[in-house]
């Protein structure tokens, strides 16, 4: 169980780090104000927009959605590891 929880924490940290680095390289992310209109796709970051392909926009959107799962899971796993360590 201990190894599994550590794996979940590592997965959450790595997923966030990859998201952060890719977002910087792409110039934004789809759920942060990005939009699609007329067959054009834009990622957003701090009021700046970067036009990307549909595939990149879709990737950004799904990677962002994955954070909604991995971040809470990593936090809960870390909390459980801390509880196990105290007892």
Image (tube, rainbow, N blue to C red):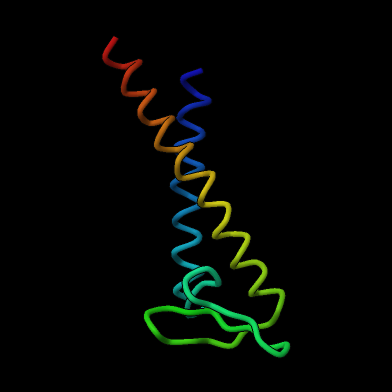
Which residue is drawn at the image coordinates 65% and 66% (left, top)?
A: 59
In percent of width and height, residue 86 lies at 26, 14
Q: Quadrant of residue 38?
A: bottom right
Q: Position of residue 75 (x, y in %)?
A: 40, 37
Q: Position of residue 87 (x, y in %)?
A: 29, 9
Q: Is residue 44 above or below residue 13?
A: below
What is the number of callouts on the image? 0
Measuring from the top left, give residue 58's x and y in whole percent.
Answer: 67, 69
Q: Is residue 69 above or below residue 65?
A: above
Q: Relative to 85, is 48 on the left or the right?
A: right
Q: Quadrant of residue 45?
A: bottom left
Residue 18 sits above or below residue 42 on the image: above
Residue 42 vertical position relative to residue 13 in the rendered view, above or below: below
Can you name the residue that lies furthest to the top here?
Answer: 87
Q: Residue furthest left?
A: 86
As drawn, is 52 to the left or to the right of 45?
right
What residue is at 51 percent from the left and 17 percent from the top?
1
In the picture as drawn, the residue positioned furthest to the front comes out as: 37
Residue shown at 46% from the left, 66% from the top: 21
Along the line of sight, the residue nearer the viewer: 49 or 56: 49
């Amino acid at each position: 169980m201990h190894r599994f929880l550590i794996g979940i924490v590592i997965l959450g940290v790595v997923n966030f780090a990859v998201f952060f680095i890719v977002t910087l390289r792409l110039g934004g992310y789809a759920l942060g104000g990005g939009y699609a209109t007329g067959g054009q796709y834009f990622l957003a970051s701090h009021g700046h927009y970067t036009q990307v392909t549909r595939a990149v926009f879709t990737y950004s959107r799904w990677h962002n959605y994955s954070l909604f799962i991995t971040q809470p899971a990593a936090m809960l796993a870390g909390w459980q590891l801390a509880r196990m360590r105290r007892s």
